[in-house]
Amino acid sequence: MKKKIALLLSIAMTATLCLAGCGNSESGEASSDEAKVYAVEAGSAGETVAKEKGWEINSVSSQADALMEVQSGTSDAAIIDLLMAGAMIGEGTSYPNLKYTDELTTEEYGIGCRKGSDLVSYINAFLAETYASGEMQQIAEIYGVQEALLEQQDCQYEAAQSDSDVAYIQEKGTLVVGITEFEPMDYQDEDNNWIGFDADMASLLAERLGVEVEFVVIDWDTKAMELDSKNIDVVWNGMTLTDEVKNAMDCTNAYCNNAQVVVVPAE
């Protein structure tokens, strides 16, 4: 499975022209049978691109639910992240009878914090440190997303002179991470522990901060409100750095490449 994700990412991100020649395209036009209703996660980059194209959408609470809509036949197609497609569809996965066709976008993932938060600076320094040490790559290889990683430039943490989010998190003793169910970034193992590339990186950050990590499933459509109300400290869940996201919260440097893809029944 991990090799499949890495291979899928490598192919999708280095051979787009070849994919187009084989019947896929970046134009967003549906391949062969044109889909009518697209299941999308509310508040996601997939929902944004579908609205831009004027497609009829069925907004659901998660990308996993979007796949279930296609599987059950209540939507013609889904728009999800390429990284999730690599983990969730095709032979040997939860949805062996689904496939992805068109690659609609290319994009980058980042991590979101409250406006004015010095946690952004802290995480940027953490990303640079773990990339330089190889820890980030080691964690990525566990989940097969190493081909999607972006090189991190050296960063130094600059603490806020007042209202420090880093100090606030250390004083309360927990780093509260807002997530959704999103394999291979954040998902639960057989013992209901949260694992995945983002989950493992967030746990490592909490260790660096000297606090416990707590994962909270949020409504993706209201993630900025969750941050502002301090229900969570950070959004760390394969979050695409759209203009809307960057206007609503302060975001870290990009750490991972991604794309939005159309998923349809394989037959």
Image (cartoon, grey):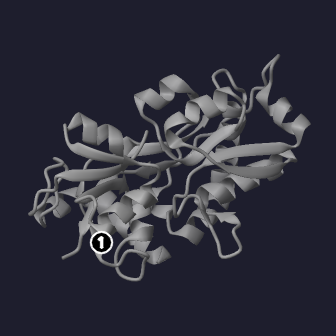
In the picture of the structure, the residue carrying the numbered disc 1 is 98
Residue at image coords 83%, 44% = 174
Residue 31 placed where, x, y %?
12, 60
Residue at image coords 60%, 29% = 225
Out of 50 and 211, give the one closest to the viewer: 50
Q: Residue furthest top?
A: 162
Q: Which residue lies furthest to the right in this view?
A: 171
Q: Can residue 182 be seen in this view?
A: yes
Out of 97 and 195, give the one closest to the viewer: 97
Residue at image coords 45%, 76% = 3
- Residue 223 location, quadrant: top right
In the displayed structure, would residue 236 be above or below residue 136?
A: above
Taking the image as shown, residue 229 lies to the left or right of residue 63, namely right
In the displayed structure, would residue 145 be above or below residue 105?
A: below
Residue 147 placed where, x, y %?
45, 62
In the displayed structure, would residue 37 be above or below residue 222?
A: below
Amino acid identity at mark 1: Leu
Q: What element carries label 1?
A: strand
Residue 53 placed where, x, y %?
20, 38
